[in-house]
Image (spheres, coloured by chain):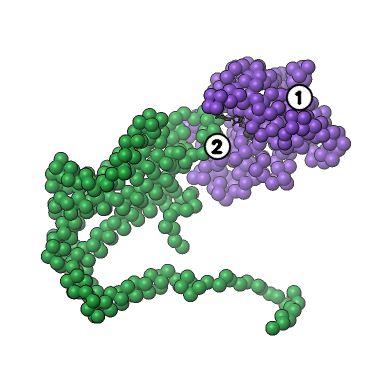
Chain colours: A green, B purple
Amino acid sequence: MTDTPVRPDEIVHTTWSEPVSFLDGLPRSVAMTALFALFIGLWQLVYILGFVSPIILPSPGETARDIVFVGKNLFTGGYMLTALWITVKEVILGFAIAIAIGFSLGVLVGETSFGERAVLPYLVAIDTMPKVAFAPLFLAWLGFGIASKVALAAFIATFPIVVGTAAGLHAADQNARMLFKTMGAGRWQTLFKMKLPLGLPHMFTGLKIAAVGVMAGAITGEFLGGGKGFGELIRVAASQLNTPRVFSLILYLSLLGLTVFWSVVWMERRFVFWHKSSVMDNR
Amino acid sequence: MLAQRQTDPKGRPVYQLRQVAKSYARGNLRALDHVDLTLAEGTFSSVIGPSGCGKSTLLKIMAGLIPPSEGSVVLEGQPVLGPRRDIGMMFQQATLFPWRSTLENIVLPIEIRDGRQAAKARHDDARALLDLVGLKGFENSMPSELSGGMAQRASICRMLITKPAVLLLDEPFSALDELSRDFMNMELQRICTERRATALLITHSIQEAVILSDIVYVMSPRPGQFVEAIAIDLPRPRTLDMMTEPKFGAYVRRIRARLDKGAFL
Ligand SMILES: Nc1ncnc2c1ncn2[C@@H]1O[C@H](COP(=O)(O)OP(=O)(O)OP(=O)(O)O)[C@@H](O)[C@H]1O
Ligand SMILES: [Mg+2]
């Protein structure tokens, strides 16, 4: 195993690559499809072996048929679409309210020492409570319509936005503050031209957490407070032991959640293009 | 004796500090103790002293960023009571904002003082400044595409865009490697000469202070005070070659001895 020496003029290129393990080397689409197939296979296996009753765990085929059925109902404007639309409204309204209140409170807490010293302790105290516990209260105040669901969704989603905004406003370092001072910038200029832009990455982190929370809030509200939304469909299907239906409804619901989440990510990429780690970036 | 040395007979006094002292309320800390300083028009002065002796504090007071606890600061016959546009400042960090192009970063001081339209109108001036510091063609680059030295040069442009009469420089090049620092120092000299700017530089490098300055002020440990003002009698324009001259070495040794006496550095 002796290396025969090479004359330098024989060498044309010495490009080489780091060794990559088989799994890590798979293209993303292949890896994801493989994982999905594996999951379905295991599921089918468990079903065939009869470990659990079909009422608890339907077969993948049965579930797929129901997914198609629910999909048809949704796309042809059936009653499920009406229910989904109600949930969509709750989510959008809840998110909008959470953004408006969360951003305002975040600026109050992050910008003023009154906010930081007097308001923040209360917010922290409320934030540590299990917010779902407020659902019956919202129900009592706002009734069984969508208002109580919007309220719970907004309530849950507000806090991450407050935290993100306040943290973002503190992100500006001493150098940036000093620089703005030397340029004679006033409070608003400092806020809008420096602190808010510098804080955007933090704010979007808060918004992404809020996007998940707003879905959870709306559905929890529907579970606890009835109404005519998608959560109610799930509750009814579950009470009828229609497990395939529950699965397919959850699937479509998760598509709604993903849509909300990815719209936030899309906005983040648009506005925070200058920040290196726009999270969940992929090649 | 000190006071006489400080008043340069060559030029009109631009900056006048009388008995300026600063105590920070927090920690009941005396940062600066009765500093007298006069900067004559078109001169270049340096302040050198141990870490924490109050150099940055002095500069912030001069720039109107923080008020002095005692004493008076007068610039061009007007007391300094806040930030002013005839003062240009530069810090150790370039601090360019990553969502603005290099050009937009440079006109930021104009945008803040006079609005967006005024800033737009100065784009040509900003390009000329980029040219001056050797960054021609980088006006549309984003700050993340600039090296540390290039970013610091862009921040020179940002300081110069308001055409300040005095430049206050707080260790502007100390984050750069030695080669770029020497180069930037020569650039700085050229810019100051061209604009007849009055400059005050804070530095930790004795060589840098000597090669650039007409007067080097040596500060004592906290609470900071000027313990000596050393006039540097080397011809202008200064070149890097002068660093090998015996006279240069003598100045460096003298300042080092003065700093060592306070047992620091
Ligand atoms: N905002 C502040 N509040 C309280 N103390 C401060 C404040 N800023 C500075 N000091 C203190 O004042 C002293 C002088 O600080 P300063 O930043 O002026 O030092 P410096 O000479 O610039 O030091 P260096 O060479 O390390 O930059 C230090 O002891 C520092 O701890
Ligand atoms: Mg300092």
Q: Nearer the viewer, residue B94 or B66?
A: B66
Which residue sits at x=85%, y=33%? B250
Q: Chain of mark 1?
A: B
- Residue with the mark numbered 1: B228
Q: Which mark is residue A160?
A: none
Quadrant where the N terminus of chain B is found in the figure: top right
Residue A22 at x, y percent in the picture: 48, 75
**SS under mark 1:** strand
Q: Is mark 2 within 8 Å of ligand 2?
A: no
Q: Nearer the viewer, residue B7 or B133?
A: B7
- Identify the chain of the residue marked 2, using the numbered disc in the image: A
- Report whether B132 appears left or right of A266: right
* B224, above or below B138, in the image: above
* Of the two numbered discs 1 and 2 in the rendering, the one whose residue sits closer to the viewer: 1
Evaluate whether residue B163 shows in this view: no
Q: Amino acid at mark 2?
A: Asn
Asked if one can make out residue A25 in the rendered structure from this viewpoint, the answer is yes
Amino acid on which the number 1 mark rests in the picture: Glu
Looking at the picture, does residue B197 appear above or below residue A210? above
Where in the image, quadrant-wise, is ligand 1 located? top right
Q: What numbered label is drawn on residue A175?
A: 2
Q: Is residue A267 left or right of residue B175?
A: left
Where does the image place residue B181, in percent across and percent down from the top left?
A: 70, 42
Label 1 neighbour load within 10 Å: few <14, some 14-19, many 20+ = some
The quarter in which the C terminus of chain B is drawn is top right
